[in-house]
Amino acid sequence: MIKRFFLASVLMVLFTHMAIGQNSIRFQVFDEETNEPLVGATAFVSTTKGGISDSQGFVTLTNLSGTEVEVRFSFVGYETQTNTYVFSEVGDETIKIMMESATEEHEEVAIVTATRSSRSIEEIPTRIEFLGTEELEEKAVMKSANIAMLLRESTGIQMQITSPSSANQSIRIQGLDGRYTQLLKDGFPLYGGFSGGLSIMQIPPLDLKQVEVIKGSNATLYGGGAIAGLVNLVSIQPEDEARFRLMLDQTSAGGTTVNTFYAKRNDKFGMSLFASGGLQKAYDVNDDNFSDIPESKALTFNPTFFYYPSADSKIRLALSGTFEDRLGGNLDAIDAEQSNANAYLQENNTNRLSYQLSYEKNWDANRSFTIKNSLLSFDRTIQEPSLTFNGQQYATFSEAAYSFGRDKSRWIVGTNLYSDNFTEDSGTNNNRNYEQITTGAFIQQVEQVSETFSIESGVRLDYNNDYGWFALPRVALFYNPASKFSYRLGGGLGYKTPTIFTEDTERLSFRGLDASNLTSLDAEKSFGGNFDINYKTAIGERWTFSVNQLFFYTQLNDPLALRQVPLTNSFRFENAGDHMRSQGLETNLKLTYNDFKLFFNYALIDAQEKFDNRNDQKPLTAKHNIGAVLVYEEEGKWRIGLEAYYTGEQYRRDLTRTDNYWITGLMVLRKFEHISLYSNFENFSDTRQSKFENINLGSNMSPSDLDIWAPLEGFVVNFGVIIDFGHSGHH
């Protein structure tokens, strides 16, 4: 009897421990505002136990030990929450989890400033690619001095180096030259015309909160210049909690960068201050005595002041100054700061000064009024042997816009005025001076026709003092038949008025350029469209998968072509006899497993110039591009990224073919409470053009003849520290 009682007691204890060791708990995760299930939300008990919500928002955690459990719920764009549950109290019931949009990461995304829409980015008919805080932090670690890395690693975007001497880079979206992309800072166009030449290299990323990329014509709100697309850089706004960031970065190529940012707001006033300083030594990796990275000294200073007259109004004044001196060419000439008969030197001195002033008034969620004004002063001097190009640009932008309507039907009407004045200081080429004034009026509507269908339509009417009238309609459709699928279809017209500032003339440092016929040419005009499919799902309890498939087409009529004048050393622009077109597809895949994320992208860019008897791929534009990035992130502690990018064959300007190549990189970031340490091994495979072909520019007096189709500097390591106080919930 005693034996039986003892045996029963032992079995009961074992059974109890087994039961405790096999507890399970079931959740259903919802968006607190819409009450819709969230697909792909994570529920973690530890780094080894967790699950991912399915298409109905359900997630079940099993084999949980103890009498209670602490569960952390997280989802991109939502506030992370941690709850404790006692198994005896929960029982078999399904627990509803209501997740709240994150104040900085999600609500600001909901108001995507490039489209001036108050709808969620997932529901906007216009296709928008969005880089948030985490991606920007990662790209800043890779390249602290400028945003070139940030843009280069986006699908379908190429950063084309136009000069081995200045290392200037131009942004190409879907194979179209940089002048067809509109670059905005907080909705202000500050980087066009003459000032676009070195702009990518002069914008550090530390003060950015988000970056929005719209591919294809988006002329309605911002004008016809955005034929290839637009990039809007959005600054961090001050909040009640003071924020301070300091970033120190050093590279193995002799580059030192210091970036600092401060922001604070009280009841009526706020301010932010961004400052950046950089020193770069001339760097020669292939021992040809020519700089693969030019020597440079740069300083940026950007204070911004905010005044809040009431809870629903804001006045913003941003001042900005960037000053840079850049020396590239023969190392002996750089050391002496003077060229001679056998030592080529190019010096670029730039001064960029601007202000942006805006007033915003919101009466309610559906009615607002904004007025903006900006002025840019840009001065640049290029000095080479037997050449001095010195000019100054003044550009202004003014706009008034009114938004009104209902929750499901929003209207935006507005008018704006652009002026662009360029004056060359040397009196020998006054035919290159110009003054263009463009006035425009626009109207756009976003209509939610049903729960699953939305339409965005608009039209813009512009008048340019040299090139006349332009009518620019645009439409975008959004269809969301199921939680896993959504579709977008959009298209529109665009134009670009002729300008002397192109990739070709930048490469030549404007040497020999005759612009006397520019106003007699036709403006370049475009039409195009894109269609994309989104699919996202959860696989089991730990995996999520999403794919975006984009198809695009853009045709450019009357494109400008730079021609050499027969029997002379001068060049003139002409309208090419036929058109240029860019078509292709972009594929973006994302796979997540617990703390791991795998990104894969592929871009097919078929860009062809249908003139000059050319029917082949546009020079220096790869038809095939592949990218793969594996990221491990332990929240608040580690971020490790391994990446590989493939660039296919390209045509040189003489139509000979280049090699294809891979670039690999590794980034490691370790976060502590207020300090982050990082190291980045960029291009550790040491892929560079001098390995594929013999490059010897040491005594070359015309380096502009070199077509740059691969990295010049090869493997570069950078490392540094970020000090961060008042992180505003980014951990």
Image (spheres, helix red, strand yellow):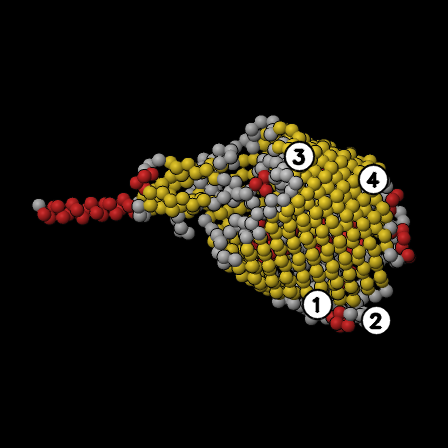
Q: CA distance from mark 1 to mark 3?
A: 50 Å
Does label 3 or label 4 sit earlier along the sequence?
Answer: 3
Report the amino acid beneath label 1. Ala
Identify the image quadrant of the N terminus. Answer: top left
Q: CA distance from mark 4 to mark 1?
A: 43 Å
Label number found at residue 2:
none
Report the amino acid beneath label 4. Asn
Secondary element under disc 1, as helix, strand or loop, is loop
**Above-or-below relation of 276 to 583:** below
Give percent across and percent down for residue 500. Answer: 82, 50
Instruction: Tell me the quarter of the picture where residue 678 sits.
Output: bottom right
Give percent across and percent down for residue 683. Answer: 60, 61
Mark 4 Cα shell of 10 Å, populated few (<14), some (14-19), many (≥20): some
On the question of residue 446 being in view, the answer is: no
Q: CA distance from mark 4 to mark 2?
A: 45 Å
Q: Which residue is denoted by mark 2 in the rendering?
A: 341
Q: Residue at x 83, y 42 (%)?
A: 437
Q: Residue at x 77, y 48 (%)?
A: 375
Discs 4, 2 touching: Cβ within 8 Å: no
Q: Residue at x 31, y 48 (%)?
A: 66
Does label 2 or label 3 sit earlier along the sequence?
Answer: 2
Report the amino acid beneath label 3. Ser
Q: Which residue is denoted by mark 3 in the rendering?
A: 368
Q: CA distance from mark 2 to mark 1?
A: 20 Å
Secondary element under disc 3, as helix, strand or loop, is strand
Does label 4 or label 2 sit earlier along the sequence?
Answer: 2
Report the amino acid beneath label 2. Ala
Secondary element under disc 4, as helix, strand or loop, is strand
Mark 3 Cα shell of 10 Å, populated few (<14), some (14-19), many (≥20): some
Q: Which residue is denoted by mark 1 in the rendering?
A: 282
Q: Which residue is denoted by mark 4 in the rendering?
A: 464
